[in-house]
Image (cartoon, grey):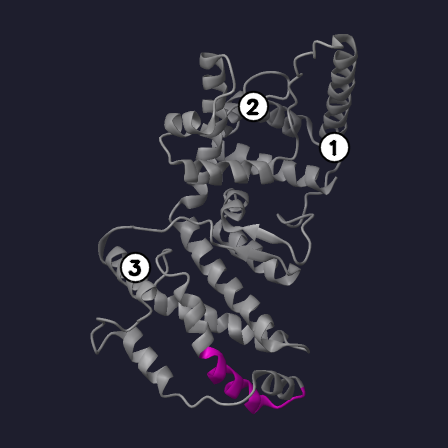
Amino acid sequence: MEFTFAASPWEGMEAGQTLSAAQALTVLAPLDDTDAQDALDELEQLGITLDASTLPMYSGTGETATRLSLERKLAAQGDLMGSLEETDPLRLYLEELAHTPAAGDVNILAMEYARGDEAAAQRLTDLMLGTVVEEARGYTGRGVLLLDLIQEGSMGLWQSILQYTQGEFQPHALWWIRQYLAKAVTLQARADGVGRKLVEAMEDYRSVCDRLSGELGRNPDRQEIAQAMHITPEELEAVTDILETARTMEYLKPRQPEPEDPEETQAVEDTAYFQMRQRIAELMSSLTEQEAKLLTLRYGLEGGLPMRPAEAGAKLGLTAREAEAMEAAALSKLRKQ
């Protein structure tokens, strides 16, 4: 029997939707750098907004970390040139931009370019570069130097000009500028290992919840889970948000029978549980035997505890990376249904 794998990791998403960069990083984790870049580029074609606000600030080490901290401070003060030396490349660029003549109406210039006036594109670019700088300020401190952010935002601006057909130009341009900025910091976060750390945090969350439930005899609260994972409540919230978004199947635990009518309650639970199990069986039948076994081990679908990719892969003779790739492919199949 042949199976067709989903061509896109964003299968099922539609234009106008928003995808958090943190969630994108967990999806991209099994991919190589080229495929990850292509996947983020595809978001633009689909009209899906990439939101980088959930990404952690990057401290790093060495000169780059010092520069990132300085730029974040200058951006917060509203004075990007601040204490920069006269020969600083960022200062030189901003000074040159300040002396670049820019005048006109963005909507008129955009329409003139759409009608074939090539010169209008340059005037429109000059008019919007200040907006690019302002938008780039909001992404300082996230691993990408400000001058590089401005370059990425300028590429987004150029794409907005090329893609423009009609309507208000400003919101159209802002979407493309922000998309390119978000993509730049997302790829940098991936290079810094944020995606891998998020996946590991998701696995730790499942493991800690199971352990605490056994130790406490009840469901642990968020503060207890955060303490056991050695993370802040804010970081825990990010992990749980990703899990909620990524979950394609829910493992239902039977509720306690209500005292007033235990037999009726149990009958409803049994029916719901049976329907849930039947639906899972239908979904799993679309997978290969090995894919089905992998998901069963990973998510504890047969009543066992969820396993990490390395643990589940070992039982199937796979490496952790092979298990992660197979899991991503299997989940893509399930999302198509």
Badge nearest the viewer, 2 or 1: 1
**What residue is disc 1 on?**
286
Numbered badge on residue 316? 2
> Which numbered disc flags the more N-terminal residue, 1 or 3?
3
Q: Main secondary structure of the magenta part?
A: helix
Vertical side of 168 occupied by 64: above or below: above
Can you say whether 270 is above or below 335 in the image?
above
* SS of the residue under disc 1: loop
Q: Which residues are magenta?
A: 115-129
Q: Position of residue 266 (x, y in %)?
A: 75, 12
How busy is the neighbourhood of tag 2: few (under 14 within 10 Å), some, or many (20 plus)? some
How far apart in space, not on screen, are marks 1 and 3 (Cα)?
48 Å
Mark in front: 2 vs 3: 3
Where is residue 303 drawn, in percent x and y? Answer: 61, 16
Q: Secondary structure at mark 2?
A: loop
Question: What amino acid is at disc 1?
Answer: Ser
Q: Label 1 neighbourhood size at 10 Å, few (<14), some (14-19), many (20+)?
A: some
Q: Earlier in the sequence, mark 2 or mark 3?
A: 3
Q: Would you name the residue on which mark 3 appears?
A: 68
Relative image position of residue 185 (x, y in whole percent): 43, 57
Name the residue at the front extreme: 260
**Nearest to N terminus: mark 2 or mark 1:** 1
Is residue 125 on the magenta stretch? Answer: yes
User: For residue 285, what is the image quadrant?
Assistant: top right
Residue at 59 percent of width and 34 percent of height: 327
Q: Quadrant of the N terminus?
A: top right
State the image coordinates of residue 147 (x, y, percent, origin top left).
35, 69
Q: Residue at x 74, y 9 (%)?
A: 262
